[in-house]
């Protein structure tokens, strides 16, 4: 009985103690909320409500965009927007800060900015220090680089713009027109940027609908996502992306310069996901893991980098009209639905499978254990694999020079048209002729080499695996 009373008394005291602690904690929170930046027990609450448009740099010099050769924007998690607006007559910087949270008294929760010229007012620098807290209720800091919508000329046409941040997003152009009747009231929301470089750790990048789609040089480094509202992004010199784990979604990226051989469309991607409807121009692809999904590549696809070799990637292209050079495809799986006339395909992989559904050009394919599946419309094919299976459908009416299919231990399945003229030569790994094959051109036993339809071009098969020669069922 006495023991139960002791337990009840202890529970009551414990409840009262916890209630006092909770009450004291709530009082501290209330004091912090009503007295921002007041340090209590080594912690303070910060809160900002800041919105300012700056049209003069430090020292009073006005921001005149037409004479600026370079603009540098440096921040951390702030979002950056480059837009047109009617709030300035030439150029301006609008900075907003509506962030709040808790920070250690010793940490930097101060907010500051500095806008200044260097290099004889040819370089404009925008530097913003954002508050940092261990608990952030809101982290809403934005930097707007504003071009006057009243200007007829493109004020940033010859300006190099560099954005450096960590996790903040970058938005290029206005999302929508400023007014429905822009022409009548003599303003424009269409923004022209020719040279843009974005360096971010994980920030997102978006090409918005009111961005002029003709650019010179674009460089993006981020592990965040990049999307485009534009139907087409044209570049005249270079378009470069560097990313790990990034997500990319474009409609069309195309080269529109004067020298097609000088175009530089470079994609350095690690475990990223890249999708585009069309890539126009020669593509330098350094792909390690991830997905590369493009509907149409109107140019060559090249990955000759011996250091950043491919591995474990999934590549799918619906249509390709240029050459392909992938000598280090390794374990990547490659699927191309259609390859245009006069294209030449060279792929060397290890365990990756190679599939081309409709090949109008020539192909040289090598794998270690990856399978090869090709439907050729009538050009030379060279396929070599150690243990992978080879499946070829040859729909052409004639052979240019020869078809060569080698697999050390894998099977070879070849289907051709019934009217195709050729000489069939099938070897084992001992380089001796093999007659133990499935051959539907005649029922009686065959003797290799055998001439079909009075042909004089060779089909050479070299393997110890199963060999089957069939006739295509073409209507």
Image (cartoon, rainbow, N blue to C red):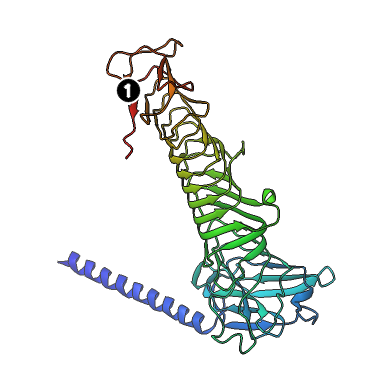
Residue 84, x across and y down, in percent:
63, 78
Residue underneath mark 1: 441
| Residue 407 can be seen, yes or no | no
Q: Residue furthest left?
A: 1
Image x and y of residue 468, in percent: 34, 23
Q: Is residue 234 depicted above or below 79 in this figure?
A: above
Query: Relative to residue 442, is residue 234 drawn left or right?
Result: right
Residue sitting at the far bottom? 185
Depth check: 469 or 211 in front? 469
Question: Who's the residue at 68% across and 57% down the image?
Answer: 257
User: Can you see residue 238?
Assistant: yes
Quarter of the figure with residue 377 = top left
Point out the image quarter for the N terminus.
Answer: bottom left
Quarter of the image with the C terminus is top left
Looking at the image, is 44 positioned above or below residue 262?
below
Q: Residues within 10 Å of mark 1 (few under 14, many from 20)?
A: few
């Amino acid at each position: 009985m006495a023991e139960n009373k002791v337990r009840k008394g202890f529970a009551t005291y414990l409840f009262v103690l916890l209630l006092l602690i909770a009450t004291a904690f709530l009082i501290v929170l209330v004091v912090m909320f009503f007295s921002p930046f007041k340090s209590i027990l080594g912690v303070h609450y910060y809160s900002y409500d800041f919105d300012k448009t700056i049209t003069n740099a430090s020292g009073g010099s006005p921001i005149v965009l037409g004479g600026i050769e370079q603009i540098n924007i440096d921040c951390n998690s702030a979002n950056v927007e480059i837009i047109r607006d009617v709030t300035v007559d030439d150029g301006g910087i609008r900075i907003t800060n509506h962030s709040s949270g808790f920070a250690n008294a010793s940490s930097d929760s101060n907010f500051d900015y500095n806008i200044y010229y260097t290099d004889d007012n040819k370089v404009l620098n925008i530097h913003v220090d954002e508050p940092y807290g261990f608990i952030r209720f809101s982290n809403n800091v934005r930097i707007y680089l504003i071009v006057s919508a009243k200007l007829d000329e493109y004020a940033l046409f010859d300006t190099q713009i560099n954005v450096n941040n960590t996790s903040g997003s970058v938005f290029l152009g206005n999302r929508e027109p400023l007014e429905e009747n822009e022409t009548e009231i003599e303003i424009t929301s269409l923004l022209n940027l020719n040279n843009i470089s974005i360096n971010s750790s994980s920030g997102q990048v978006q090409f918005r609908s009111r961005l002029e789609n003709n650019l010179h040089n674009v460089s993006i480094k981020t592990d965040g996502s990049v999307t485009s509202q534009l139907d087409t992004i044209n570049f005249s010199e270079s378009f470069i992306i560097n990313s790990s784990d990034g997500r990319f979604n474009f409609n069309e990226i195309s080269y529109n310069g004067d020298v097609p051989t000088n175009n530089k469309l470079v994609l350095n991607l690690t475990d990223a996901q890249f999708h585009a409807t069309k890539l126009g121009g020669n593509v330098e692809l350094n792909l390690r893991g991830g997905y590369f999904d493009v509907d149409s590549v109107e140019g060559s696809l090249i990955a000759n980098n011996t250091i950043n070799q491919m591995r474990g990637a999934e590549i799918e292209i619906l249509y390709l009209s240029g050459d392909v050079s992938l000598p280090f495809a390794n374990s990547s799986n490659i699927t191309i639905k259609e390859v245009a006339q006069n294209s030449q395909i060279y792929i060397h992989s290890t365990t990756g499978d190679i599939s081309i559904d409709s090949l109008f050009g020539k192909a040289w394919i090598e794998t270690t254990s990856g399978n090869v599946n090709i439907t050729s419309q009538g050009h030379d094919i060279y396929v070599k694999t150690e243990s992978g299976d080879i499946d070829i459908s040859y729909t052409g009416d004639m052979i240019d020079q020869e078809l060569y299919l080698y697999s050390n231990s894998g099977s070879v399945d070849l289907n051709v048209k019934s009217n195709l003229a050729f000489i069939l030569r099938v070897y084992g790994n001992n380089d001796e002729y093999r007659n133990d094959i499935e051959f539907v051109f005649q029922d009686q036993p065959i003797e290799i080499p055998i001439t079909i339809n009075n042909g004089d071009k060779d089909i050479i098969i070299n393997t110890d695996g199963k060999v089957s020669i069939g006739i295509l069922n073409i209507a």
